[in-house]
Image: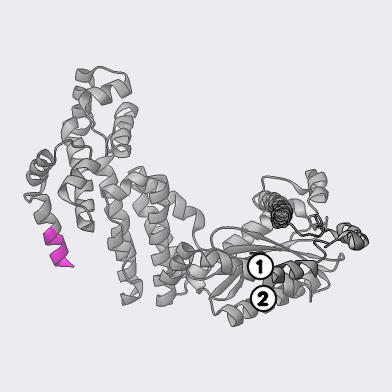
Amino acid sequence: MFNFHLFYHILSFNSINPGKNHFSYAKHGLLLGAYDYLEKPVSIEKLCNLLKNAYEALKKKQLEKEKSKKLREKLELNLSISREKILYDLLRGKEVFSKLGGLISEYDIDISDRMVLVGLIEVGNFDATSKEWIKSGKLGELIKKIREVIHSISKGYENLICNTIDMDIGIIGVILQPVNENKMKKFEDLSNDFFEVISKEIKRNYNVRVTVGIGNIVSCPNDISLSYMGAKSALRHKYILGGNKIINISQFSGNNSRSLLYPVEREKILAEYIMAGDDRALKLAENTFDDIAAGGQDNLKRIAFATGQLIFNISHFIDIHYGFINKIYDFSEFTNINMSDFNSKEEIKAYFIKFVTSVLDVVKEYKPAQSNPLIKKACEYVLGNIEQDITLLSIAEYLNISKNYFCSLFKQETGYNFLEYVTKIKMEWAKMLLKEGNYKTYEVSEMLGYREASYFSRLFRKYTNQSPAEYRKSFQNQK
């Protein structure tokens, strides 16, 4: 039955008209956006068609509106990404400001040819809470809100131009310039005040740790990468001075700079020495620790914090660049320790040297014959493909040499039978997997490239004097 209530409700929106006498109203309704009109006597079929057509037209209009909105958002996103890319390349020294005039104008980036300063704002402390933020996506939301706070505060600084950019996880880059060419001291004081206000506001609103690293002022954007490197270096001083504060690289100028600087570059060199099996790693480790201790001014808490961070960073670097090492070496023995439990500088140093020696010994054992390119290549292949079924034939084909020659050469250079070497590495990885307690014996066998779990179990017992199940249980009992 026809719903007259609905019909008269539709009338109130000028969607239809009931007859020829009211055609002028229908015409006016059509001009206002109505889609059709009805005449008396009202036909239910015509009304249904009118409603259907009106619905389809409105739906189409809404879809076009949503499509247009998404297109605008996409264009705005692309524009934002392009701006970020230009700023990122400037900071990293990949591009020079003087050669980007057209792009700077095209993307409406507010940077001028005058003094510039870079600051890095690190949010959080990358503890368990921060890791949960990253996993849940909350850190990204927080960074977005903090960038909005920064730009909101910058509006109160009429003499400053502020650009922000997302850097590494949890780090916001801030590029500051004076509106007019001011004296450097005035710009420096204004910038320091700006970062003080931002730091306090973030802590107050979001109850998180905030560490700010500020670089030196440079005379023009062509040198902006120097200010960025200074800010990055200043931020690394948190390992010695502690975080949740503002650290300005300028405070380390003069005689104090050498003793206070965190060993950023030596950290990387030390990791590379270790992974090359180079004994120079031990001497470098001693010197690096001594510099950290001097920089920490014999403050045990600072020394412990910096050394713990150094161990973590070296482990992280090795994990990224030499991923196979985690299959044969458990870093958690060293990275999970609370360095503040040590009672003296000497204890911390001994522990750090023990860490370096331990990893170095593993590398020497499993990456032997570094002087022979062929054997080195073979070892690296095995370490990088532990999960494969590696045979003498497969490695000989990979190296493009005869099987017998390779077998003889490998024994001569390393003292190992090649298949014994492969088995040893696989068994070390098996121990790591079984320690986790999450895998059944057959699953570990498959992960190591063995076709039969029974064969894997025999090898494992021969290597450890325990079955895989016994080993897993014994380790679980130790927890």
Quadrant of the image occupied by residue 173: bottom right
Q: Residue 3: percent from the left, percent from the top? A: 67, 67
Q: Residue 174: percent from the left, percent from the top? A: 68, 64
Q: Looking at numbered disc 2 in the image, what kind of residue is underneath it? A: Ile
Q: Residue 186: percent from the left, percent from the top? A: 80, 73
User: Please, what secondary structure does the residue beneath circle 1 have?
Assistant: helix
Q: Residue 403: percent from the left, percent from the top? A: 22, 19
- For mark 2, what is the residue? 198
Residue shown at 68% from the left, 69% from the top:
148
Q: Earlier in the sequence, mark 1 or mark 2?
A: 1
| Observer-nearest of 64 and 416 | 64
Quadrant of the image occupied by residue 196: bottom right
Residue farthest right in this picture? 24
> How are the colours assigned in the image?
one colour
Q: Are marks 1 and 2 in contact (CB under 8 Å)?
A: no
| Observer-nearest of 97 and 342 | 97
User: Please, what secondary structure does the residue beneath circle 2 have?
Assistant: helix
Quadrant of the image occupied by residue 293: bottom left
Residue shown at 23% from the left, 37% from the top:
449
Residue 167 visible, this angle: yes
Q: Looking at numbered disc 1 in the image, what kind of residue is underneath it? A: Arg
Res 259 label: none
Q: Which residues are magenta?
A: 473-479
Residue shown at 50% from the left, 74% from the top:
242
Residue 257 visible, this angle: no
